[in-house]
């Protein structure tokens, strides 16, 4: 029996966390259906070391979430291959949305190619990916960046053009290594829509890949594992972070202002029209994939565009001003508290007759 290794590569913000949690919870029942959800390299319900080991070897340092495993990518992947060999399951599943980042780094693609080459004759490979309309994806990922608070996040347009890796809007780039290494026939591309958030629909859709009945997972399991921050709070959260609410007030307003100017500077030469063009070209790639069921024309109706009414430069200018105001308020409150503490100390001394 030739086993099939299914690599669920995301995308980000397409229910991956919920699917990973459900697969972990239902590992035994999946196994009875011939589906083995990898356990040896599973951390927090997912298999991110498979991607991080490759990205680390390719020199990537951003958004590595503290990954510090010194094993080579080949060693990490060999753990997956060894577990697959020992499993009686016909289908082996590994899942991490971090796989999508490999498309943004050419060196990572070549490392993946070298890892897969020796086992091509031993295993079949299928690649599962969910995609959402580009604008919806970008807005959701922007929300996530602010929510994670791993570093300063600029305004929406600046974040898309200068901070986000292009795989977040250029699906051709994101899928390129998987098409190149495994072939277009290996890809299973599904649209992530609002309908999949209802009544366990995402679980049913995912399980159908393995011919497993959707009744296996209940509606109760269809919970949001990574809830989205309220959109009305995103800019407020971003501004408070940029104002240094959790930092020492040593830097003062000038340093914060300089930091913010650096955040909103467009140094890459990319603007939103470039982003929209690449997003449209990426959608055109999907039509040629045999396993694609995404309606590219529908997705093309939600391409990312400059919109000053939602996340445009007018909003960025306003929030920059709010940053300075927050910084000044924080500084004034600190000075006031210090002054009050000094006055209180003197009053206590006077009452004791020592001054």
Image (spheres, grey):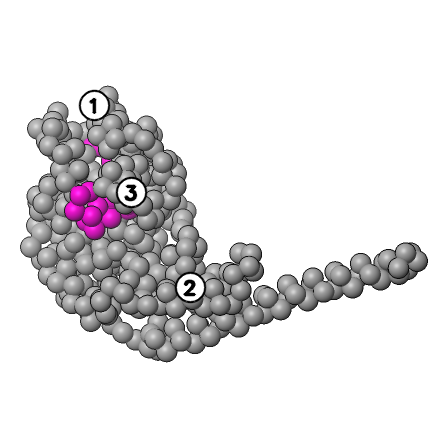
Q: CA distance from mark 3 to mark 2?
A: 33 Å
Between label 1 and label 2, give the one nearer the viewer.
2
Query: Who comes first in sequence, dot 3 or dot 1?
Result: 1
Q: Residue at x 24, y 21 (%)?
A: 86
Along the viewing direction, whichever of 53 and 208 lies nearer the viewer: 53
Q: Mark 3 vs mark 2: give the one in front.
A: 2
Residue 16 rendering spot, x and y as whole percentages: 31, 47
Residue 311 screen position, x and y as percent: 35, 72
The answer to whether residue 92 is above or below residue 233 is above
Q: What residue lies at 18% left-to-right and 63% top-to-bottom?
A: 279
- The C terminus - image quarter: bottom right
* Element type at mark 1: helix
- Residue 303 horizontal/vertical position (percent): 22, 68
Q: Where does label 3 land, which residue?
A: 96
Residues in magenta? Answer: 91-108
Residue that mark 2 sits on: 259
Residue 195 in sight from this viewpoint? no
Query: Which residue: 93% across, 58% down?
Result: 353
């Amino acid at each position: 029996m030739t086993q099939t290794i299914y690599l669920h590569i995301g995308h980000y913000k397409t229910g991956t966390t919920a699917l990973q949690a459900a697969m972990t919870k239902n590992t035994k029942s999946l196994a009875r259906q011939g589906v083995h959800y990898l356990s040896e390299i599973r951390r927090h319900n997912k298999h991110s070391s498979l991607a991080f080991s490759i990205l680390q070897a390719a020199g990537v340092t951003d958004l590595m979430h503290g990954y510090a495993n010194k094993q080579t990518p080949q060693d990490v992947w060999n753990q997956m291959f060894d577990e697959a060999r020992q499993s009686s399951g016909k289908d082996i599943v590994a899942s991490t949305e971090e796989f999508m980042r490999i498309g943004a780094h050419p060196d990572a693609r070549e490392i993946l190619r070298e890892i897969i080459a020796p086992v091509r004759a031993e295993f079949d490979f299928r690649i599962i990916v969910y995609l959402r309309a580009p604008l919806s994806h970008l807005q959701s990922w922007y929300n996530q960046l602010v929510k994670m608070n791993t570093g300063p996040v600029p305004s929406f347009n600046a974040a898309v053009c200068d901070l986000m890796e292009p795989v977040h809007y250029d699906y051709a780039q994101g899928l390129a290594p998987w098409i190149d290494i495994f072939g277009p026939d290996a890809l299973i591309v599904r649209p992530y829509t609002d309908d999949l958030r209802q009544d366990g629909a995402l679980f049913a859709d995912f399980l159908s890949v393995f011919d497993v009945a959707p009744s296996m997972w209940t509606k109760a399991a269809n919970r949001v594992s990574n809830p989205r921050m309220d959109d009305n709070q995103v800019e407020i959260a971003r501004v408070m972070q940029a104002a240094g609410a959790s930092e020492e007030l040593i830097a003062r307003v000038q340093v914060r202002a300089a930091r913010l100017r650096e955040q909103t500077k467009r140094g890459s030469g990319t603007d939103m029209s470039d982003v929209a063009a690449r997003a449209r070209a990426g959608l055109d790639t999907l039509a040629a994939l045999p396993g694609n069921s995404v309606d590219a024309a529908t997705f093309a109706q939600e391409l990312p565009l400059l919109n000053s009414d939602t996340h445009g430069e007018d909003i960025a200018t306003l929030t920059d001003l709010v940053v300075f105001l927050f910084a000044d308020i924080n500084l004034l409150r600190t000075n006031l508290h210090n002054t009050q503490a000094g006055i209180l100390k003197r009053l206590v001394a006077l009452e004791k007759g020592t001054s």
